[in-house]
Amino acid sequence: MTLRFASIGSGSQGNATLVEKYDTCLLIDCGFSFTQVQQRLARLGRRADDLTAILVTHEHSDHIRGVATLAGKCNIPVWMTPGTAAQIDISGIPKLQLFNCHEPFIINDLQVNPYPVPHDAREPCQYVFTDGDSRFGLLTDTGCSTPHIEASLSGCDALMLECNHDSGMLIRGTYPQPLKDRIGGRYGHLSNKQSMDLLSCLDCSRIQHIVAAHLSEKNNTPYLAQQALSQPLDCRPEWVGVADQEAGLPWREIV
Ligand SMILES: [Zn+2]
Ligand SMILES: [Zn+2]
């Protein structure tokens, strides 16, 4: 069986991503209520009891809102950095596992390679997953790229990259100026252009899937994100997947 991934929903209202190999099924973040998670997992043919572990990227509510309830009800271990653990209520989490975001660790059939990112949280990280053959790289909630991010994501078989906003739409939009400054700042979120520039720095020789994620509903459109990410790959915009806030993203297999 191949390494596969899916999104149960992506955007400022809630995020959660699935990565799976054999019986190892990891949920990255859970920004949804328990009821929502159950319904959204069912769409992908999974139940909460199928989850091997939950990995958290950072403490913002669109990523952790449902973590403690889900972990508590289904007795699922939760992995996070010490900085993230210091920022949230961990009392409901039955099995808390802390890790160093510069050191890989193994959960059953998957190796997890965390890496730090610049974002306005205490100790935010993102992840690259591998089964030894294929690599899936996940990156959302970062204000800018770094050489370490580029090194971490280079050579992946599949990528899910934040395309939070179109800079022009953000500037012209109705958000208050401090919020615009935060989103567009070095500890905010990646624009379509920043994500495109990052992708053009990566070794994409193995790439089978590229998915745009964490799109702003106010300051972006799926097509603008697809257009941006298609340019470095010289592919049709439609070939770029989009992880939707409501619909998520169906399973994608790395072959
Ligand atoms: Zn977020
Ligand atoms: Zn965030």
Image (spheres, rainbow, N blue to C red):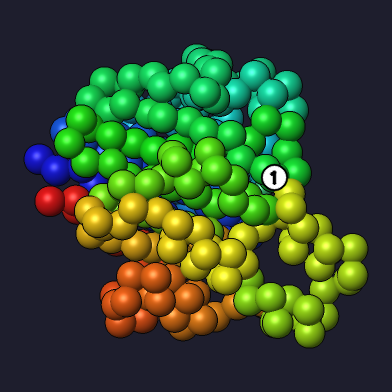
| Residue denoted by label 1 | 119
- Residue 147 vs residue 174: left or right? left
Q: Nearer the viewer, residue 149 or 142?
A: 149
Residue 86, picture quadrant: top right
Q: Is residue 246 visible?
A: no
Q: As displayed, is residue 107 above or below residue 65?
A: above
Q: As displayed, is residue 50 above or below residue 206?
A: above
Amino acid type, label 1: His
Residue 209, picture quadrant: bottom left
Q: Nearer the viewer, residue 65 or 7?
A: 7
Q: Is residue 115 visible?
A: yes
- Residue 90 vs residue 222: left or right? right
- Considering the numbered disc 1 on the image, is that residue within a helix, a strand or a loop? loop
Q: Which residue is painted at 21% across and 41% down in the image?
A: 134
Q: Is the CB of the residue bearing disc 1 within 8 angstroms of ligand 2?
A: yes
- Residue 55 vs residue 236: left or right? right
Q: Nearer the viewer, residue 187 or 92?
A: 187
Q: As displayed, is residue 44 above or below residue 47?
A: below
Residue 138, horizontal then vertical, whole percent: 44, 47
Q: Quadrant of the N terminus?
A: top left
Q: Nearer the viewer, residue 82 or 190?
A: 190
Q: Which residue is painted at 19% across and 51% down in the image?
A: 254
Q: Which residue is painted at 67% across and 30% down in the image?
A: 123
- Residue 231 vs residue 145: left or right? left
Q: Which residue is painted at 59% across and 45% down in the image?
A: 146
Q: Residues within 10 Å of mark 1 (few under 14, many from 20)?
A: many
Q: As displayed, is residue 192 above or below residue 143?
A: below
